[in-house]
Amino acid sequence: MAIEKSLTEYWQSHFVTEPGQTVIVACSGGPDSLALLDLLWGLRDKLAIKVVAAHYEHGIRGQASMDDEAFVRDYCQNKGIPFYAESGNIPQLSRESGESLETCARRMRYAFLQQLAEGLNNALIATAHHADDQAETVLMHFLRGTGMKGLTGMLPKRDNLIRPLLGFTKAELVEYCRQQGLSPRLDATNQEPDCTRNKLRLQLLPLLQSEYNPNISQSLCQLAELTAPEEELLDSLCRQAADRLISQDTGKGNTLKCPVGDFLQEPLAIQRRLIQYMVGQLRPGKAFGFQHVEAVLELIKKGATGTSLNLSHRCLGKISYGFFYLSKNNDEFLTSHGTIKDTPYKIILKLGSKVELPGGGSISAFVTDSLEGEAPFSRCKIYCDAEKCGTELVVRYRQDGDRIRLEAGSKKLKDFFVDAKVERSSRDSVPLVVSSHSDEIIWVAGLRQTSVALADKDTKQYVILSYGKGEE
């Protein structure tokens, strides 16, 4: 078949495997992953690989989730494919971690797959992401204000994770299943516009396709393909600069330093990447948002010795005698470079954007004309009157004299924390969303919305404020 020939060519041009290397196919039972498993099982001799299947039962959809696992297990048993499975209570785990269901499920699924890969002699993990997924990813990154790296979308290979289906569309995979007589499982939650990716797939992409560009998905995939080699080049140049400029602070394994003068001689694109390189070394897998990168650049350009900046991912930056230091917020660094209390965090939150928090997590503010279809009010998501909020808000932590205005009257923030049973040691890390004009507290994030900027029957536009305690 044509799809088998195309997959073989894609595999040989993108992946280098040892003869007999094990490939774990992550299979949910849906059409994409079932097609991938069926294809690779049929091509295993030609590709000289061993194929096994893995399924993570997340417990989100009750009996339907268990039926998914049983379906994949039966398919593998009929084909003679080695099968591995693990179950988890994602609803409970997500409540405990403060993550969304999607983020928690993804984290636990990949943890299971990586553990399995290690036990199978460092096997490769194959996922069924296809061209339509790639288009969604690039568009979602673009809407969030990504840099070039985000425009590359998903790479065919990253470490031991491979994506053999990026060159194929969803329609091609569904048609393959039909031709092979496969009856994949269908997840009804994928058709509910209750999360960003689903809304993008079900609403925005069809609109762009019908009104602006009938080939929008292909165009987005082409953008990713064009951007990837340029990103690779810039990343290489950044690493060369990092080798020259960045070193560990003597005796402090959790602190990196960079000479200010030499740093400022680099092109702006490399400067920004060097900052991201430093945080990535200290906090693997993490990156600063645009506003924090720009804040660090401003600190390096204008900061005098002793000037410091509290940043996201529990990082702290400081200028000292011609060097920029970036460190994890730990006792070692704070002892030698000052305390967090000396470096108050305060950042502008423009409507339609998101800011990262020093202790991890984020606050976002988005405007909508209607709350129809939105999740119910919760401690981590509130709705305000856009007109009362103004064009921008401020995210900060508590200050001396802070008060909150409630329907029953005004109260000291300190007393509110006592009543809410917030530990004294945690109070300095509770984010506050405040008015940029009056400095009145609109939201004690994760705890209580105040009576400032409340939406009412006369509200024409709403601001949706969301507090994410962990990243997606």
Image (cartoon, rainbow, N blue to C red):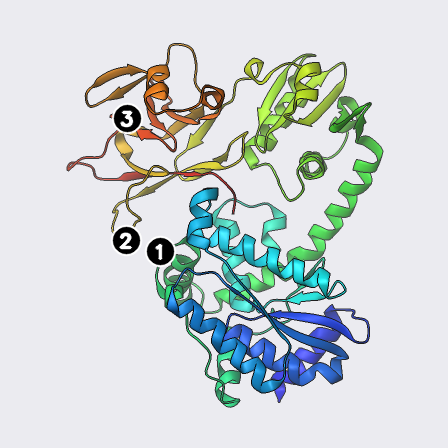
Q: Secondary structure at mark 1?
A: loop
- Sequence-wise first label, 2 or 3: 2
Q: Residue under circle 1?
A: 194
Q: Are marks 2 and 1 in contact (CB under 8 Å)?
A: yes
* Residue plotted at (55% across, 15% down): 341
Query: Relative to the observer, which residue lies in front, 146 or 187?
Result: 187
Q: Residue under circle 2?
A: 373
Residue 300 at x, y = what percent?
68, 22
What is the spatial separation of the Cα atoms under label 3 and label 1, in whole angstroms? 26 Å
How many numbered marks does the figure carry? 3
Q: Secondary structure at mark 3?
A: loop
The residue under label 2 is which amino acid type?
A: Gly
Q: Are marks 3 and 1 in contact (CB under 8 Å)?
A: no
Query: In the image, 250: left or right of 31?
Result: right
Q: Nearer the viewer, mark 2 or mark 3?
A: 3
Residue 120 at x, y = what percent?
73, 66
- The answer to whether residue 465 of the structure is visible from this angle is no
- The answer to whether residue 321 of the structure is visible from this angle is yes
In the figure, residue 114 lies in which quadrant? bottom right
Disc number for residue 438: none
What is the quadrant of the N terminus in the image? bottom right
Instruction: Note whether 463 is above or below 125 in the view shown.
Output: above
Instruction: Note whether 26 is above or below 429 in the view shown.
Output: below
Q: Residue under circle 3?
A: 450
In the figure, residue 434 lies in which quadrant? top left
In the figure, residue 278 lies in which quadrant? top right
Query: In the image, 445: left or right of 451?
Result: right
- Sequence-wise first label, 2 or 1: 1
* Residue plotted at (48% across, 80% down): 174
The residue under label 3 is which amino acid type?
A: Thr
What is the spatial separation of the Cα atoms under label 2 and label 1, in whole angstroms? 7 Å
